[in-house]
Structures are given as C-alpha cells and as structure tokens.
Image: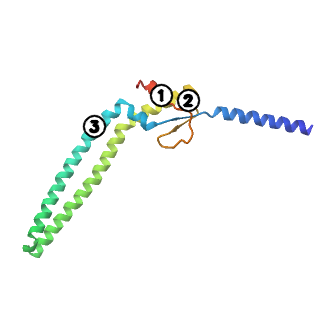
Amino acid sequence: MKRLFKVALVAVCMLFVGTYAKAQKIAHINFNQLIEQMPETKTIRTQMEAYQKTFVDTYTTMGNEFQTKAQAYEKDKATMNDATRSAKETELQDLQKRIQDFQKDAQGKVEAKSNELTRPLFTKARASISKVAKAKGYTYVLDSSQTELLVSPDADDLLASVKADLGLK
C-alpha cells in the first residue's frame, strides 16, 4: 500500500512539473533593433538634433565670450591694478560658472525632451510585443539587446512577427 502511494505521488508530481514547464514559454526580441527600424525614430532623431543645436549654439557663443575675455585679461593683466584684476577674475569665474550651469541645465532639458519624444514610441513597441507574445502563447519575452543570450532558438525570436504587426519591412 505504501509503495502504491509513493508511485502515485511521484506520478502526480511529474504531471505538475510537466504542466508547469510547458506553461512557461520564453521568447526574445532585440528591442533596440526594433526601435531603430520604426519610421518614427528618424523623425525623433531629427527633432532632437534641432533641439540640441539651439543649446550647442548658445554654449558655443558663451564659450567664445569666455575665451575672448580670458585672452583680454591675460593680455592686460600686467598693467591692471589689484582692484581691476580682482574684478576681471571674478567676472571670468562667474562667466565660467554660468557656462557650467547652462551645460547641466541643457543636458537635463535634452534628456527630458528625448524621454518625452520616445515614450510613445516605446509604448507602441511594447504593446505590439505584448500582443504578439500573447497570440503566440509566450509567457516571458527577454530583450536580447540588453541581455546576451548564449543559446536561443530562431523560432523564439519575435522580431519578425512584431515588425509585421507594426507594418515594418
């Protein structure tokens, strides 16, 4: 009787393990490659380049102003009295600080603008990945651009299916 009970218990455990293993289907997709192939990426890139250019132009102007004032200071430093020299040094330090503050502020604004523009694109891509994964019965989808897959069957790569779902070639 005990032996029959053990055999039945092992059979039930094997049944559960087999069912669990079949329920966990895993696929992968190169998310960065998908994003690069979406037509919206080119538009976003163009918008970001134009947005960044405004900051680069201002930064260049500020840098040139600093360079000019620093050269003038170096040239006339020997003939300046202490008060004038101190005032010019303070002016150069203030200008340098403004340039650094501008650079930090510009980087934050560019990053925020990039996030604002790419959020809908990422949402669209993720929705399509979820749709295709659900239709094909996948429980998990790994981003192969973030994780190096040592072994991955071609059949579990969702890139072609998601591209088709998004209407990409």
Name the residue beneath numbered marker 2: 155
SS at badge 1: helix
Q: Where residue 144 sits in the image (x, y, percent)?
A: 50, 39
What amino acid type is highlighted by mark number 1?
Ala
Q: Give neighbour class at mark 2: few <14, some 14-19, many 20+ (Cα, 10 Å).
A: few
Q: How many marks?
A: 3
Question: What's the amino acid at mark 2?
Answer: Ala
- The numbered mark, 3 or 2, whose residue comes first in the sequence reads 3
Residue 159 in the image, given as x and y percentages of width and height: 48, 31
- The colour scheme applied to this rendered structure is rainbow
Whether residue 30 sits left or right of residue 45 in the image: it is right
Residue at left 9%, top 75%?
81
Which residue was labeled with disc 1? Answer: 160
Q: Quadrant of the C terminus?
A: top left
- Distance between the Cα atoms at labels 3 and 2? 37 Å
Contact check, label 1 and label 3, Cβ < 8 Å: no
What's the residue type where badge 3 is placed? Gln
Q: Which residue is tagged 3?
A: 47
Question: In the image, what residue occupies the spot 14% across and 57% down?
Answer: 65
